[in-house]
Image (cartoon, rainbow, N blue to C red):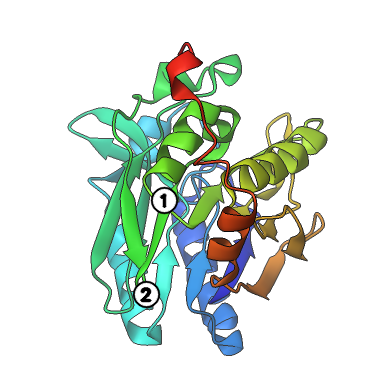
Amino acid sequence: MRIALLQMNVVLGEPETNRSKVEQMVEEAVKEKPDVIVLPETWNTGFFPENVAELADVKGEPACSLLSRLARENNVNIVGGSISNNVDGKVYNTNYVFNRKGELVSEYRKIHLFSPSGEHNYFEHGREISIYEIDGVKAATVICYDIRFVELIRTLALKGIEILFVPAQWPHPRLEHWRTLLKARAIENQMFVAAVNGVGEAGKLEFCGTSMLLDPWGKVIAGAEEDEGIITGEIDLSIIKDIRERINVFRDRRPEVYEL
């Protein structure tokens, strides 16, 4: 499976500008014939303007129509990063996934909101995981801060996912946390991780890029630095079964002694 990561400089508070850029970057990415294209977190509004409720898409529109059309026209799966999404006056940080036909196959609302930046004061918490299939492969999405919560990722792994998608707007100076957490989640859960971060600035925040595609050993298959751009890498899903048989952490778990 070929995966393209769109490391994007999202313009804070300018959804129309960002929609145009997404369309341009997708059209560029499909030249490499990926099976999946992945976007960063809150690519419509940025992370996040004080008037985010006013700028957010309403019930997923127009972002969903754009992503659905791009998926259908280019015969590609799109993991749509996330958008600021206003649903009946409540704003959610929402991921949408579309298959090659442009059909919606998953909707996930960010469960863990980043309280140090006050995200919980502007957004509502999601309450459900979402597991879906991309070309027959089980996958799931978590968003940025979610990656710090091992219980969430292990829950997804125990349900059989093989690819974890992680859209983010992860800032300096926590670049090493980003690298370390992504590698740890890949290794401990023996899965591929496709993580897409933003670049550029939003107020006092400077995003650190470093998007990466990791294999279940924690090896970087493809990685970016801190400039806007597209990186593409190939993953071999057939290796997961062998890895999980050779070091069978799922069989060797002792949940009866864990206190969670």
Q: Residue furthest top?
A: 259
Does 2 appear above or below 247? below
Question: Mark 1: which secondary structure?
Answer: strand
Residue 41, position in %: x, y?
A: 52, 46
Visible in this render: residue 163? yes
Q: Amino acid at mark 1?
A: Ala
- Give the label on residue 135, or none: 2
Dot 2 alpha-carbon crowd within 10 angstroms: few under 14, some 14 to 19, many 20 or more: few
Question: Mark 2: which secondary structure?
Answer: loop
Tell me the CA gap for discs 2 and 1: 13 Å
**Along the viewing direction, whichever of 56 and 190 lies nearer the viewer:** 190
Does 102 appear above or below 212? below
Q: Residue at x 29, y 34 (%)?
A: 128
Total numbered labels placed on residues in the image: 2
| First along the sequence among labels 2 and 1 | 2
Visible in this render: residue 62? no
In the rendered structure, the answer to whether residue 88 lies left or right of residue 76 reads left
**Along the viewing direction, whichever of 149 and 254 lies nearer the viewer:** 254
- Can you identify the residue that label 1 sits on? 140
